[in-house]
Image: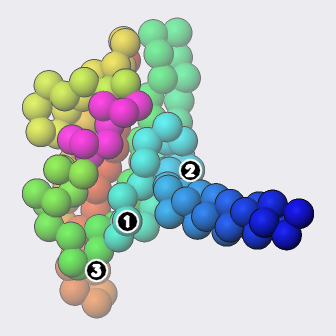
């Protein structure tokens, strides 16, 4: 009985560790798109619009200073196919009747420049 109890305790600890290690954040504005570590969603720049031809969705995130453009694009090249997106270029993907484009821009801010990534889904 003691061995069963120890076994169950070990399984519980391992299970919760695995669950927390595999937890992944997603955009609130685009719930089926993962949010890379080091990005912070800018929710007030989100837009979602449904029309007969399909949806238009925009999600934006600020890019951490330790992430360069190639790391960001490489992450999405690995992550998006797991959600059914097929790459047509390094920053453009298709899934069913939708196109997803990733753009990276730099804008001036009061404390220096700020890099922003936008995810735009269109029919």
Residue at the spot 21% in from the left edge and 70% down from the top edge: 67
Region rendered in magenta: 76-83
- Between the residue at mark 1 and the residue at mark 2, the CA separation in whole angstroms equals 15 Å
Please tell me the numbered disc located at residue 37: 1
Horizontal side of residue 47 vs 89, given as left or right = right
Rendering coords of residue 84 (x, y %): 37, 24
Q: Number of callouts in the render?
A: 3
- Between the residue at mark 3 and the residue at mark 1, the CA separation in whole angstroms equals 22 Å
Q: Main secondary structure of the magenta part?
A: helix
Residue at the spot 37% in from the left edge and 12% down from the top edge: 96
N-terminal of the pair, mark 3 or mark 2, is 2
Q: Nearer the viewer, residue 4 or 28?
A: 4
Residue 80 sits above or below residue 65 on the image: above
Residue where numbered disc 2 is placed: 28
Residue where numbered disc 3 is placed: 109
For the C terminus, the image quarter is top left
Rendering coords of residue 26 (x, y %): 50, 51
Rendering coords of residue 12 (x, y %): 72, 63
Closer to the camera: disc 1 or disc 2? 1
């Amino acid at each position: 009985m003691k061995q069963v109890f120890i076994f169950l305790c070990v399984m519980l600890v391992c299970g919760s560790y695995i669950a927390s290690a595999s937890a992944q954040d997603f955009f609130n504005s685009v719930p089926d798109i993962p949010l890379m570590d080091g990005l912070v969603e800018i929710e007030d720049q989100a837009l979602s619009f449904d029309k007969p031809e399909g949806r238009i969705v925009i999600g934006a995130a600020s890019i951490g200073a330790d992430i360069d453009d190639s790391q960001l694009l490489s992450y999405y090249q690995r992550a998006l196919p797991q959600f059914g997106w097929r790459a047509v270029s390094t920053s453009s993907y298709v899934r069913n009747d939708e196109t997803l484009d990733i753009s990276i821009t730099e804008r001036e801010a009061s404390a220096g420049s700020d890099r922003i990534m936008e995810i735009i889904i269109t029919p």
